[in-house]
Amino acid sequence: MSMQNNNEVVIKDIKMPFMSMVVFMVKWVIASIPAMLILSVIAGIFATVFGTLVSP
């Protein structure tokens, strides 16, 4: 007895004023800055550890 519950949502159109879209994208970019800083720190730590292990 297998029950499948398919509740699919399909978005066909989003109506958004141009300035609202611009403000949304600016907020998105500002929110990505801390994420990039965190990823840079993690990459730096990884590179330091890997470089230390590989160097003679």
Image (cartoon, rainbow, N blue to C red):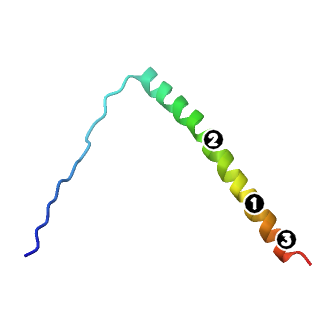
Residue carrying label 2 = 34
Residue at 82% in and 75% down: 53
The label shown at residue 30 is none
Residue at 20% in and 53% down: 8
Nearer-the-camera pick, 42 or 20: 42
Residue at 53% in and 30% down: 27
Q: Earlier in the sequence, mark 1 or mark 3?
A: 1
Which amino acid, by three-letter code, is at mark 2?
Answer: Pro
Q: Quadrant of the N terminus?
A: bottom left
Which amino acid, by three-letter code, is at mark 3?
Answer: Thr
Q: Quadrant of residue 51?
A: bottom right
The percent position of residue 15, horizontal first and vertical second, equals: 31, 28
Residue carrying label 1 = 45
Left or right: residue 56 compared with residue 4: right
Q: Earlier in the sequence, mark 3 or mark 2?
A: 2
Q: Earlier in the sequence, mark 1 or mark 2?
A: 2
Q: Quadrant of the C terminus?
A: bottom right
Residue carrying label 3 = 52
